[in-house]
Amino acid sequence: EIPDAAFIHAARKRRQLARELGGEAPLVENEVTNKRLTHEDENGGSDDEDEKRIVFSGVKMKSQRQKIAEEI
């Protein structure tokens, strides 16, 4: 959910006041964040997808670099 203008204005005021006092503004946790995290946890069981190997295209970039180096 997107915060409204009043919420954003209040957050800016809190941050400014914290800067003036030399402290840090506390993070405000809302229910939306907590619900989203709970929802993601319920979908568990697909942990294998997170652990799959990612193939990068670094090999192609290396060959392109080699071609350029050979031309020079």
Image (cartoon, rainbow, N blue to C red):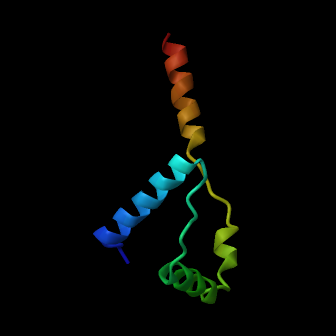
Q: Residue at x 54, y 16 (%)?
A: 69
Q: Could you say where residue 35 lies in the image, as x and y percent from the top left?
A: 53, 86
Q: Residue at x 48, y 54 (%)?
A: 17
Q: Nearer the viewer, residue 28 or 53?
A: 28
**Left or right of 6: which side holds 26?**
right
Furthest-front residue in this view: 21
- Compared to residue 19, the image places residue 65 above or below, namely above
**Quadrant of the image containing the N terminus:** bottom left
**Left or right of 43: which side holds 7?**
left
**Quarter where residue 58 is shown:** top right
Q: Could you say where residue 62 lies in the image, as x and y percent from the top left?
A: 58, 32
- Compared to residue 63, the image places residue 45 above or below, namely below
- Compared to residue 26, the image places residue 2 above or below, namely below
What is the tally of numbered marks visible in this picture? 0
**Left or right of 58: which side holds 5?**
left
Q: Could you say where residue 23 lies in the image, as x and y percent from the top left?
A: 61, 52
Q: Nearer the viewer, residue 8 or 17?
A: 17
Q: Could you say where residue 32 lies in the image, as x and y percent from the top left?
A: 48, 82
Q: Residue at x 55, y 45 (%)?
A: 57
Furthest-top residue in this view: 72
Furthest-left residue in this view: 5
Q: Nearer the viewer, residue 51 or 34?
A: 34
